[in-house]
Every structure is written in C-alpha cells, then in structure tokens.
Amino acid sequence: MKFTIQRDLFVQSIQDVMKAVSTRTTIPILTGIKLIASEEGITLTGSDSDISIESFIPVEEDGKVLVEVQETGGVVLQAKFFSEIVKKLPGTDIEMEITQGFQTVIRSGSAEFNLNGLDPREYPHLPQIAEEHVFKMPADLLRALIRQTVFAVSTSETRPILTGVNWQISDSQLTCVATDSHRLAMRTAPIEESLSEEYNVVIPGKSLTELSKIVDDTTDPVDIVITENQILFKTKHILFFSRLLEGNYPDTSRLIPSESKTTMSIKTKEFLQAIDRASLLAREGRNNVVKLATEVNNSVEVSSDSPEIGKVVEHIQTSNMEGEELRISFSAKYMMDALKAVEGTEITIQFTGAMRPFILRPLDDESILQLILPVRTY
Amino acid sequence: MKFTIQRDLFVQSIQDVMKAVSTRTTIPILTGIKLIASEEGITLTGSDSDISIESFIPVEEDGKVLVEVQETGGVVLQAKFFSEIVKKLPGTDIEMEITQGFQTVIRSGSAEFNLNGLDPREYPHLPQIAEEHVFKMPADLLRALIRQTVFAVSTSETRPILTGVNWQISDSQLTCVATDSHRLAMRTAPIEESLSEEYNVVIPGKSLTELSKIVDDTTDPVDIVITENQILFKTKHILFFSRLLEGNYPDTSRLIPSESKTTMSIKTKEFLQAIDRASLLAREGRNNVVKLATEVNNSVEVSSDSPEIGKVVEHIQTSNMEGEELRISFSAKYMMDALKAVEGTEITIQFTGAMRPFILRPLDDESILQLILPVRTY
C-alpha cells in the first residue's frame, strides 16, 4: 500500500469513521481503523460491532485528483493515535506507505511517523446487505426525524427495547416513535417510493445520534435499506450500518389521547424560557417539577418553589385557550426537551385533566407530536 | 433595599465576583454574594476567604443612568442560584427589592423570583488595606506577567510555597518567578513609581489565574497594593484581594545557568508543533518525554517512540546553531508550556549539556526566561 492524499479530506473521512470506533470493545482490532487502498480510491472503516461506518475517498472527483494510489493494499491502524496524528500533520498532503509487515510510514512536511499496523484481513467483515428494498429520504429530513425523537429514548437497560426508536413504514408513511414510558416523541414523514413490504424495526438511539452527526444538513438523498437485523444508511461516500434491536416495540398508539379538555396555543420560545427559569429552582426541589395553572384573561401561570432557596412565578399570555380550568405539574426537563424538538414559533397543548398525559404539537402541523405524563403534586 | 439595574451590567458584575465564590467552603455564608445598595451605587462581593472580589456599579457613569436606587440596604443571596437566575431573566432591566426579613424579590419582564436571603452584617469583612505603597501597571502587562509564569507553579502541596508565584520588587523592577522544581518561568517588568521599600511576596497561583480572567486586555492602569499578608489589585470598578503565602521562597537565581555550551535559534511555532506531534506518541511511552539531537546543516532532530504504537522523527531547521553537539531528552509538556509562554516568532535555546537545565528566551528579549530540567534517557 502506498498513496498520497489531501490532508483535509483525509481528516474529515477519519473523523466520520471514528464515530463508530469505541475504546471499550472486547475485540481489540476494533480499536483500529481499517484502510484499504484500491485503484478506485481509499476506503476507511470503523466499527464497534453495533455501528459500522465506511467512508470512501475516490481517486478523482469532479475532475480533481484527490488521491494518488501508487500501490494497492491495506492496514489497520490504532484509531486514537492515527486520527490525532493526521490532524496535527504539517503538510497539505499526506503520504502513507506500508514498509514491511504492517509497519506504516506516514509522511507530511518535515514529519515522519512510523506506526505499528495490523493485518486488515483480521478485521471483521461488514454486514452484507442485499439492496432490494431501498427508499430515499433527504438528509435534512432524516436529521430532523432523529432530532425530534431520539432524545425521548430510555437510558435505562431495564427494558432494552425502549433504548431504541421505533420506525414503522406502511402506506408510504414512516412513523418514528421513542418513549421512556414517562414521555413520548412521535414524528411522521411521507415516503416517496411505494414499498411493497411493511416494516416495523427498532434502531438503537445511540446509532441514530451518531448518524445525525455524519449526515450533512442538505437536501441530498440518503438511501435507506432495512433487513431483518440491520439498517443501512448510504450517502454519497459513506455507508452507515447499525444493528437493529431485537424484540417487539410496545403499541404506543393507545397512549395518545384522542380528546382534549383544555387546549391552549402559546409562543414556543417564550414558554420554553419561562420553564427554563422555573426549572432553576425546581432542580433543587423534588425531581425538577414545575407547575402550570390556567388563569383568567387567557394567561397561564408557570411556577416552582424550593423551600430552601425560594420560589418563582411567571405569567404567560396564550394566544388561545379553551376548555376547563387546569392545574398540572410536570417535569421541566421533559417539557424543555419537547419544546426544543417541536418546530415552529407557536405550539398547541392539549390537556385531558391533571393526571392524564398531555400532548404538544406545532400549530397546524400533524407530523410532530410530543406527549408528557404529568406528575402528581397538586 | 430596592433598586432597578441594567441586566447586562449586573450579569457581568455578578460573573466577576462569582470567580471568588467557592462551593466548597467551611463558612456557609461565603456560598453567597453580598449585595449592598447605597446612594452611590451597587456593591457586590464574593469571597472564598483566600480571594475576595468586590465589584461596584455606580448610579451614573458618563452621563448615563445605570442604576436607580429607591431604597438603600443589603442582602446576601445564594451565589449559584442568583447568578443563574439573573442570566436567564427576560427583561433588559431588573428590579430587586427586599420585602420582609431578607426575602428578596427579583422582577424582570414577566418573571418574578422570591429568594431567601441572609443578613449582610453576617458576611465577613474584607481586609482593610492602607493604600500607602501603591504602584501601577497596565492591565495587559499584568495579564502577560501572569500568563507567562503562573503555569509553572507546583500543583502539589508538598512544598506549599511553590504553589505561588514569587514577586520581587527592587530598584524599580518587578521580577516574577514560578517553579515546580522541574521547570521555572521568570518574567521581569519595569515599575514606573520609585517605591521606597523592597518587596518579596508569594501570591497563590490560583489567585493570579482568577485575576487574569477579570482584568481586561487593555492598557488601563491597575493599582497594586502589597501589605504583609495581602495583595490588592484595583481596576476602575473592581477590587481583587488575595492573601499571600507564608514562608520564604527559595532563591532560584543560582539555578539559571550563566554560560552555554550549545546555542540555537529556532522558529517558535514550527518547534512547538513538532514537539506537539512527537508528544502524541510520547504520552503513551515513559512520562511524555521527547528527544532532541543536533544534526549537521544547522538542523535538529525531534523524535519520540512508544514500543507499542510506533515512532516519530522530525527534522527542523534552526536559523543559527553554535557550540557542541547535543543529545537531550525533556518533557514535551514542559517544553510546550514554555514555548506557548514565550512571546515572539523566534526563540533562542541555550544548553549547557545533556544533564543540565537549559533556558529558552525570545530572540533579543531579556525580560522572559523559561528554564527546563532535562530527563535522563540517552
């Protein structure tokens, strides 16, 4: 193996595959990055066996030479050192060469590194995925889907299935649901392709979080392939594999109230900031709980108190309020998470009583729903 | 106490005094900030008994009204909550009022906080310092003095005196020295005032670090007053008190070699980056040690190796090299700290043998000196 590559491109590609590399792995070779130089270009692979990322740098793109491959071959290099070294190299180009065994020389400007490498044939193979059932989604929509649901997954391993996001596809619609059994986030999106099969899979929350760091915020299409135990996301030069969680995701549709007793519309940012302020004292009190009460004149009172520190009261004007009077308490954190996930300057909140789950949606947008279970305090 | 104040000014002032507030204090009231409203303005005080900071916001400045004091008085409020609350208040103005006892109401926009306060008379008094022997220094010079020395203080409490920076004033010259007994940083600066007395004090490194965060990077003068066990730094609206360390600082002047056997001049940034790269592998090896060897053609070789990971070699051109051949090893961290502290694009390094301390200075500048003890490896 011997090639010369542009430093900036190489750094980006290494950063991308690094997102799959874990230092806590039971398979030592997975602490490394696999590099393969072929006549077409350079392929980098990182994996923690749950997530695998492959990044490809072609020899040439848009008429520009990105890599010069003098000799094909491959090696596995310690990810941590390799990535730090490449970032700090002085030149704009980097030359990589395997000398003997898997000893790898990295040259750039005045610097020459000599790293102990491993045989790439010892590196686990990536899942083989038949690309029969592919659907496409713009990258920015994929990022939004993830951002608006993944925060609500459970962080506890007591019900492992809840650490993932449930993706259901049927009738050309994708529905993403995440819940930790105290709150739930749901987002739907249309699928353009008419898929013959229906899908119901659970993707680990961590995989989606890492994926959204790699996918650019553009309208470029991402190809998505779902198999029995793997999902693959393909962008122009990156393959992102994740295993799927085993087990059945609970049916959450019955949790979502279909009627409402108290409905209000409120400015998202103003409400979020008020909850944030109330949460300053709530954090010291019991479990970060803030209170909300309807008032006359279409306003609501947000309050919180901590006997040791003090209390806070705030009155916020709603643009519309209908239905019964209400006094309800909820986690400030869940409310802030939900408000940050909801797009739009104004939201509608529908309550069905002080002890029943309530839902938030952007005004006039049915594709996003956030559900929160209240806390008994009043 | 009742006053209205501009939020941004108040936030800045609170941030400044917060630098002295510690959550780990044996005196509970010191977890608070003392607020005193007088007819002249608002005084805020924070202290951890080692460092005390007082910030003053006048009623009026440059013809602009900053504070409206309706009623004088004072209170001590929990620093952590108070600072977070003020930062997150919605309005551009803040109204503060003591209602009964030391209950304090904070109003801004739609928000109203009610905090439990304490009696300001229970707050410890700041040191009383007679301002007889004042000298002045531009704020940016003070920051440079601190930046170039404080990193070299000892972090170990085995010799507490070495956790401070030694300031000596005599013959209208200030000399600042810090050492952890493995390396030493020294910086001198002229003092304009002719002080009748000589001073030799040791200022805790932590105090200087906090001070440099508060002092602006301007040429505005800072008044400095030294007493037997306190030092006071005065800017326009801030008083910064620090206790001094007790004990005698060791005489370090004999450590600094007066002759040189190998001298070289080298570009600071290029050398720093090469050491940084060598340190990537050195960190894994024994104690972050890199090697330097003189070569023919006025160049030096910087190298490092870690049996498990690999090795790195780099050749750097010096602009001038005189004297004996040399092979020497030293801590990459100490060298990088020293190179970052030295100003100027080019430095001179003077060696007196592989096992003797060596010194770095900016080219043609005697006011800065960095000394490093080598490590035995060759």
Image (cartoon, coloured by chain):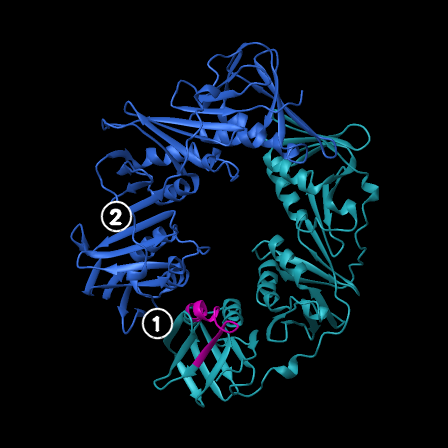
Chain colours: A blue, B cyan
Quadrant of the image containing the N terminus of chain B: top right
Say whether residue A166 is magenta: no
Say whether residue B290 is magenta: yes
Crowding near pointer 1: few (<14 within 10 Å), some, many (20+)? many
Q: In which quarter of the image is residue B257?
A: bottom right
Identify the residue shown where x is 70% and y is 67%.
B157
Task: Say what amino acid the circle numbered 1 marks.
Answer: Asn
Residue A195: percent from left, percent from top: 24, 28
Identify the residue shown where x is 54% and y is 85%.
B355
Residue A216: percent from left, percent from top: 33, 42
Residue A203: percent from left, percent from top: 39, 37
Give the magenta-colored segment's residue range.
B275-292
Residue B239, compared with residue B323, is above or below; it is: above
Residue under label 2: A237
Q: SS for tag 1?
A: strand
Visible residue check, residue B253:
yes
Tell which residue pokes out farthest to the right in this image: B121
Residue B105, compared with residue B300, is above or below; it is: above
Disc assigned to residue A114: 1
Residue A26, compared with residue A165, is above or below; it is: below
